[in-house]
Image (spheres, rainbow, N blue to C red):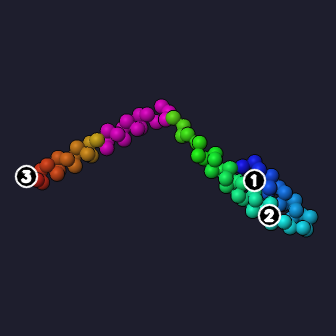
Amino acid sequence: MLIGIIFFVIFFTSDQSMQLQPLPFFGGVAAALIGFYFIRKDWKPAPPTQRFATLRKMQQKQAEAKEKQKQKQQGGQKK
């Protein structure tokens, strides 16, 4: 990723000198994409916090209640 940024700096400085060189631009794009891929490949999501634990419990109870209600409705329709 850092190499891609360096290539972008080289590209922009070559643009200011009126001698545009596209190779650093395309090299920078490729290096940045490869770097981003390697960073995201090893990315681990943060563990869940207790911040919204009460809200999650309430949502889970509501989902369970809806599921039970659906099962009762389906059981009543079969008879």
Q: Which residue is mark 2?
A: 23
- Neighbourhood count class around disc 1 (C-alpha, 10 Å): few under 14, some 14–19, many 20 upward: many
Q: Is 33 situated above or below 69?
A: below
- The answer to which of marks 1 and 3 sits earlier in the sequence is 1
| Left or right: 11, with 50 as reference point | right
Dividing the picture into quadrants, the one containing residue 67 is: top left
> Which residue is found at the position 35% from the left and 40% from the top?
60
Question: CB of mark 2 within 8 Å of CB of mark 3?
Answer: no
Q: Amino acid at mark 3?
A: Lys
> Which residue is found at the position 31% from the left and 44% from the top?
63
Q: Is 22 situated above or below 49?
A: below
Q: CA distance from mark 1 to mark 3?
A: 67 Å
- The answer to which of marks 2 and 1 sits earlier in the sequence is 1
- Neighbourhood count class around disc 2 (C-alpha, 10 Å): few under 14, some 14–19, many 20 upward: few
Comparing labels 2 and 1, the label whose residue is closer to the camera: 2
SS for dot 2: helix
- The answer to which of marks 2 and 3 sits earlier in the sequence is 2
Q: Which residue is mark 1?
A: 4
Q: Amino acid at mark 1?
A: Gly
Q: CA distance from mark 2 to mark 1?
A: 12 Å
| Left or right: 18, with 67 as reference point | right
Look at the image and give the residue range highlighted in magenta: 48-63
> Which residue is found at the position 70% from the left and 58% from the top?
30
Q: Determine which of the numbered discs, if any, sits on residue 79 in the image.
A: 3
Q: CA distance from mark 2 to mark 3?
A: 74 Å
Dividing the picture into quadrants, the one containing residue 32 is: bottom right
Foreground pick, 47 / 70: 47
